[in-house]
Amino acid sequence: MVVAGYLLIMHLQGQRLLAVQTASMQPTLRPGDAVLVKPVAASQLHAGEIISYISARDPTLVITHRLVKIDDRTKWLTTSGDALHTLDPTFPPRLVLGQVTAVAPGLGVVLDSLRKPVGLMLAVYVPALLAIASEVKRLLGHYKSQHYQLYPS
């Protein structure tokens, strides 16, 4: 719970909280984990760091892999998943979202659940309705105890 609170604070400070979907980074990252990604300029990155970037092939896809090298001339980056035996296609530095700064095992499952209607309903709408119902009950009790007449005769 402390880790989740820390990750929420970091997210509110501009960092991204992403859910790991595949096993390409095992054993470092597992499906169902969450990673916190700090925005960093590509020029500040170094080989060996885990980064997240937008796929050059599919702009709706975010990839989180280990940075293998940065081309000295073009500054294009090459990454690879820890569990993979091949390099990813090189990509321009403008696609970099940032560097992974923290991992929360299992929190990605919660994030994925919140993206589904049932998860959103259980996490947001049901607690909101319970809070409203509780407040209405408290107000009705208050008005009854003060001898207010709710409905004039």
Image (spheres, rainbow, N blue to C red):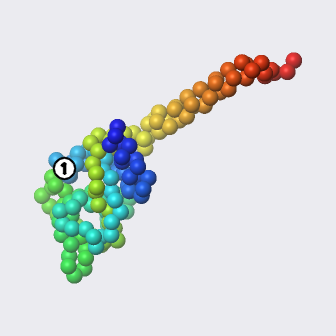
Query: Which part of the image, by quadrant, shows the C terminus?
Result: top right
Residue sitting at x 68%, y 26%: 139
> Horizontal and vertical percent for residue 110?
36, 39
Amino acid type of the residue tagged 1 in the rendering: Thr
Residue 45 position (above or below residue 1)? below
Q: Is residue 47 left or right of residue 108?
A: left
Residue 113 position (above or below residue 88)? above
Residue sitting at x 38%, y 56%: 15
Residue 3, by quadrant, is top left
How many other residues sit within 10 Å of disc 1, few (<14), some (14-19) or many (≥20)?
A: few
Residue furthest to the left: 85
Q: Secondary structure at mark 1?
A: loop
> Horizontal and vertical percent for residue 46?
21, 68
Closer to us: 105 or 109: 105
Query: Which part of the image, by quadrant, shows the N terminus?
Result: top left
Q: Is residue 88 visible?
A: no
Closer to us: 50 or 94: 50
Q: Is residue 130 visible?
A: yes
Residue sitting at x 20%, y 79%: 72
Residue furthest to the front: 146
Residue 136 position (above or below residue 23)? above
Instruction: Residue under label 1, please give it.
Output: 28
